[in-house]
Amino acid sequence: MNPESTSSQESKQSFSMDDFAKALEQPQYNYGFQKGQIVTGKVYSYESEGVYIDIGGKSLALLPIQEAFLGVTQDLSEALPLQLERDFLIIREQNAEGEVLLSIKQLEINQIWENLIELQEGGQSFQVRVIGTNKGGVTVDVQSLRGFIPRSHLLAKDNLESLIDQVLTVNFLELDQEKKKIVMSQRLAAQSAGFSKLIVGQLVEGKVAGVKPFGVFVDLEGLTGLLHITQVSQKRVDSLSTIFAQGNLVKAMIVDLDEGRKRISLSTKVLENYPGEMLEKIDEVMESADARAERARKALPQLQ
């Protein structure tokens, strides 16, 4: 082998090893730790600025006091005893001294967002506590995060102050983790709960909430049913306003439900003894609606 070649290889190898060793000493070497990464660490010591955590890096990582807990600050030594091993979230990569900044609070917040997204995807109702009010509605505690319910989506809209500390059942209107926006509706949750109690063939009673050329909207204790003009009577109806007025009580049978669209289709023509009875003797039809509904269910299998 050529001596000069051997000498050259040894020189390159020596240089490479030295270069690697120096690289390890440079502050920019981060041992693979990156912002947003979840790492396992062990509680090492307590200092005035927070808790030092051993995550296997060149230097100890710092968990600032304000990043230790979500909510009220707890006793560090009790919540994070020495040698405790757990997960942390890196919120800042190492600085010039090689120190990484950690957070438990942000890790918990991320988990809460995951929980909320699962609730939204499942269309589930859940409970929140009212913690404040403003001109547009109320602010609520959502698993330690802050959410908002617009006044128009509250069941009790007049005295918002009376709602403070109350627990409300809600559904999501908007959930945006990037914008940190959580908007909910108590009204939609109530509608979902009420809707689940309805069945086709059920006789319901409500107040006329509106009369349109195509049909009558009926308020069913927070839910809205539609009595279409073709479902009012077996006889042709020329004008609904001559039969119904806003605020009138009306009994009708549910003939179709669409929970996805929250649509309730109603009928009074199935209660008639003869075509046109709703137009001529609506009061009699309403008074004996229960017996008529029972008869209609037996006569129409799809309503049973």
Image (spheres, rainbow, N blue to C red):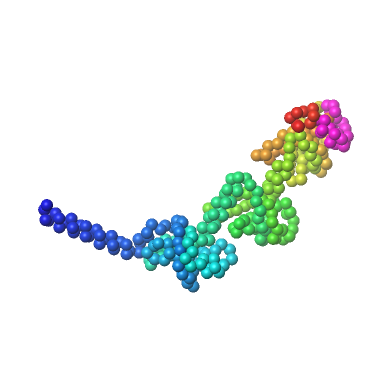
Q: Is residue 237 visible?
A: no
Residue 72 coordinates in the image, percent (x, y)? 59, 66
Of the 4 image quadrants, the one containing the C terminus is top right
Q: Residue at x 58, y 51 (%)?
A: 116
Residue at the bottom extreme? Answer: 48
> Residue 290 magenta-drawn?
yes
In the depicted structure, whether residue 164 falls above or below residue 226: below
Residue bounds of the magenta highlight? 273-296
Q: Residue at x 58, y 63 (%)?
A: 71
Along the line of sight, which residue is nearer the eye, 243 or 180? 180
Q: Is residue 44 visible?
A: yes
Q: Judge left or right: residue 195 versus residue 57.
A: right
Q: Quadrant of residue 279?
A: top right
Q: Quadrant of residue 201?
A: top right
Majority SS type along the magenta span: helix
Residue 268 coordinates in the image, percent (x, y)? 80, 33
Q: Residue at x 79, y 39 (%)?
A: 204
> Residue 277 magenta-drawn?
yes
Residue 145 coordinates in the image, percent (x, y)? 59, 58
Residue 158 coordinates in the image, percent (x, y)? 74, 56
